[in-house]
Amino acid sequence: MTEINTNTTENYSKNNTSNPTNTNIKNKITYDDKVIEKIVGHALESVDGLLSAKGGFFSSVKNNMVNSNSVTDGVSVEVGSEEVAVDLDIIVEYGKDIPKIADHIKEIVAENVDKMTHLKVIEVNVNVVDIRTKEEQEKAEVTVQDRMSKAANSTSQFVSEKTEKMKKNNSSSNQTDGLVN
């Protein structure tokens, strides 16, 4: 019995077929589209002249209703087992060289996706949906939620002021009534 165990141990060491550190273990990594979209979205944050990646109409409506600018807005991908295709809807800063921005986007997207996933970016399609100055972009980013919050604060302040005024008027009125009696 002891000899069999020794032989088994020796065979295990020689063949190394069950060793967990064996490089013959097969594995497969898959990526959800959202993961690649986030990698692309974060990569775009460093592109000069790119004001925003924006989704279509419904994405814009959603973002203008609540403060929910997602890094994946305006980014869609098709992920294969070894390759990725990227479609972008972007807003570019007025006065900037759009083809140069598109080239930079292509480079930085391919670099980041490859670095993190080892997938090859085979296509980056850039659709320029708008061109704005930085000031126009800042104004456009004010959401309905921000406007509602401002309105609520203004209303609250107005009510407080009117309440104080009424208290003063009632106080003055009560003092005057006391003098008349």
Image: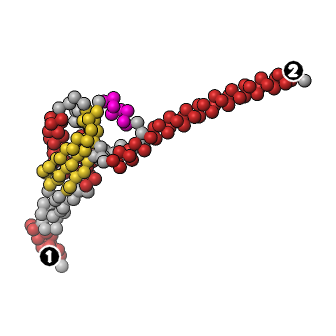
Question: What residue is at 74 percent from the left and 25 percent from the top?
Answer: 169
Residue span colored magenta: 134-141
Give the quarter of the figure containing the N terminus: bottom left
Task: Residue 43: give x, y in percent of width and height.
Answer: 23, 41
Question: What residue is at 20 percent from the left and 55 percent from the top?
Answer: 78
Residue count near mark 1 (Cα–Cα under 10 Å), binned few <14, some 14–19, many ≥20: few
Is 147 placed above or below 37 here? Answer: above
Label 1 vs 2, first from the N-terminus: 1
Looking at the image, the residue that sits furthest to the right is 181
Residue count near mark 2 (Cα–Cα under 10 Å), binned few <14, some 14–19, many ≥20: few
Q: Nearer the viewer, residue 177 or 111?
A: 177
Residue 87 showing in the rendered view = yes
Q: Determine which residue is flagged by label 2.
A: 179
Question: What residue is at 59 percent from the left and 31 percent from the top?
Answer: 157
Task: Residue 109: give x, y in percent of width and height.
Answer: 18, 44
Give the quarter of the figure containing the C terminus: top right
Say whether residue 136 is magenta.
Answer: yes
Which label was assigned to residue 3?
1
Q: Main secondary structure of the magenta part?
A: helix
Q: Nearer the viewer, residue 66 or 33?
A: 66
Numbered disc 2: secondary structure: helix
Which label was assigned to residue 172?
none
Rendering quarter of residue 25: bottom left
Amino acid type, residue under disc 2 in the picture:
Leu
Amino acid type, residue under disc 1 in the picture:
Glu
Numbered disc 1: secondary structure: helix
Q: Nearer the viewer, mark 1 or mark 2?
A: 2
